[in-house]
Amino acid sequence: MIDVYHMVNPQDLIDTATQLADGLGGERRARPRQTELRCAVSCAYYAMFHTLASRCADTMVGATPRNRPNRAWRQAYRALDHNRAKSRCSNLGMMNLFPSATQSFREHFIEMQRYRHLADYDPWFEFDRSQLKQLVVETGDRMRQFNSVDTSDRLAFSAYILFPIRQP
């Protein structure tokens, strides 16, 4: 069975976003096309999304492929929903309960989702190459910081992001 954990590597997406922002999507040029910049935005957002999905699955089911049921891990991974994640990350009252690295990740996640929507759906929006390159660097930094969050805090955040909130 193919292990989903190895199918999407968020760092590969960051590397691809960097290459696209540099204009290396095809032949070498001095300036990237807007299409490449739009794809770079999308790659950077999906790097964050897949980081969040894999951290949720790792925390809930197990991080070591050898010691976890792959079907359960895949289900936890796929349980992450773009809209719910954004909505939960937008709830400052709850987000203030999490460590600063998680708060920083959530803030950037919302920003990147907004940029991805502009890239995908607004034909008139133009991306600035230097700002986009900085955004990609920040995305990688926020992902690394989030990956270092304590396991108990990641567990609480994963449960908050993935599961419906029910009042007692």
Image (tube, rainbow, N blue to C red):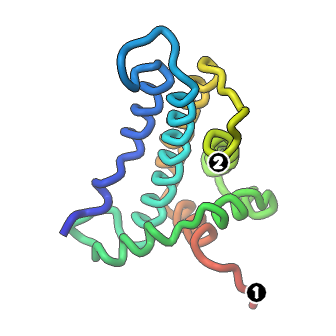
Q: Residue furthest front?
A: 123
Closer to the camera, 44 or 29?
Answer: 29
Closer to the camera, 11 or 120?
Answer: 120
- Judge the density around disc 1: few (<14), some (14-19), many (≥20) Cα neighbours within 10 Å: few
In which quadrant will I find the C terminus? Answer: bottom right
- Please indicate, yes or no, whether residue 100 appears anywhere in the rendered image: no
Residues at discs 1 and 2 in contact (Cβ within 8 Å):
no
Closer to the camera, 147 or 109?
Answer: 109
Task: Give the structural element (helix, strand or loop) at label 2.
Answer: helix
Image quadrant assignment for residue 132: top right
Q: Position of residue 149 (x, y in %)?
A: 52, 51
Three-letter code, disc 1: Gln
Q: Residue at horizontal 56%, vertical 36%?
A: 41
Task: Give the structural element (helix, strand or loop) at label 1.
Answer: loop
The number of numbered discs placed on residues in the rendered structure image is 2
Q: Residue at horizontal 68%, vertical 27%?
A: 126
Relative to 159, say whether 37 is above or below. Answer: above
Q: Position of residue 87 (x, y in %)?
A: 72, 63
- Judge the density around disc 2: few (<14), some (14-19), many (≥20) Cα neighbours within 10 Å: many
Label 1 or label 2, whichever lies nearer to me, is 2
Mark nearer the N terminus (1 vs 2):
2
Q: Position of residue 129 (x, y in %)?
A: 60, 20
Q: Position of residue 104 (x, y in %)?
A: 66, 44
Image quadrant assignment for residue 55: bottom left
Relative to 149, say whether 129 is above or below. Answer: above
Q: Is residue 54 left or right of residue 139?
A: left
- Please indicate, yes or no, whether residue 62 appears anywhere in the rendered image: yes
The residue indicated by pointer 1 is 167
Three-letter code, disc 2: Gln
Q: Between marks 1 and 2, how big is the CA–CA gap?
A: 29 Å
The residue indicated by pointer 2 is 113
Relative to 157, say whether 45 is above or below. Answer: above
